[in-house]
Amino acid sequence: MEKQPPHVTSKLRHNILEMPSVIHEATGIRVYGRLIKSLVFTTDLAIIRNCDADAVFAVYPFTPQQAISNAIINASYIPVFCGVGGGTTNGLRTVGLAKDVESQGAMGVILNAPITNRNLLAVSRSVDIPIIITVVNKKVDINRRLKVGASIINVAAGEDTPEVVQWIRKSYPDIPIIASGGNTEEKIKKTIDAGANAITFTPPSTSELFKTMMEGYRQKK
């Protein structure tokens, strides 16, 4: 039987948000010597400070802002990968944001699927940290993305994610792949079995977590 590592907690910080245990079955991606299997997909600082994820996947549905990335990087004690645009935000602003988050201490930058290869190339020539390119379907030219600077593929194809991961893995057996695993252990395992090296996990919101806590308080006499 494999020996398990000892767990150390404290009186107040024992109730952290744990990533699904099945994620440990992934091979992980070693970035600057650090092995990363789980990435928490959130910008909520309270969750970032109280979870056991290996890294933060800081992407949000607004134009990226330096103040937000700086706050997340400064508050987090685990590595942060920051979104710097690629959709609505692009061009020179994306290049500038990538340089900013690198100087702030981000471990890598995340670019959204619509970014042009020219813009991706400009980013790759401007920073010296890994560039994660998001893939949402099988229409993308993966080879071209890699040639112009992408170092990690992030598959976010909804229900088709395992299929797209498997499609990429068939042609690129060694390329690092991050993928969204879904909200159940079965879906996460399916994505890992398809070839994902690391999983992004979307945690419950703080309001959902607090609701569970309050229900427990109400049941106490």
Image (tube, rainbow, N blue to C red):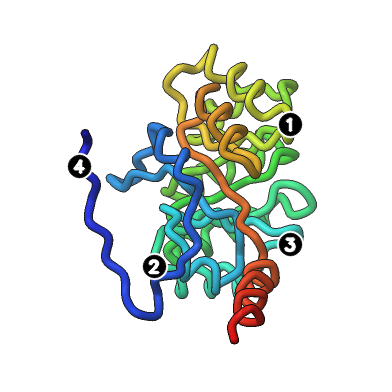
Residue at point 70% right, 24% down? 140
**Tag 2 secondary structure:** loop
Which amino acid type is marked by label 2? Tyr
Q: Which residue is mark 2?
A: 77
| Residue bearing mark 4 | 3
x 54%, y 27%: residue: 146
Around disc 2, counting alpha carbons within 10 Å, would you say few (fewer than 14), some (14 to 19), or many (20 or more)? few
Residue ID for mark 1: 159
Quadrant of the image occupied by residue 121:
top right
Q: Earlier in the sequence, mark 3 or mark 4?
A: 4
Which sits in the foreground, 100 or 23?
23
Q: Mark 3 = which residue?
A: 63
Mark 2 vs 4, N-terminal side? 4
The N terminus - image quarter: top left
Whether residues under marks 2 and 3 lie with C-beta atoms below 8 angstroms apart, the answer is no
- In this view of the protein, which residue sits in the foreground, 147 or 26? 26
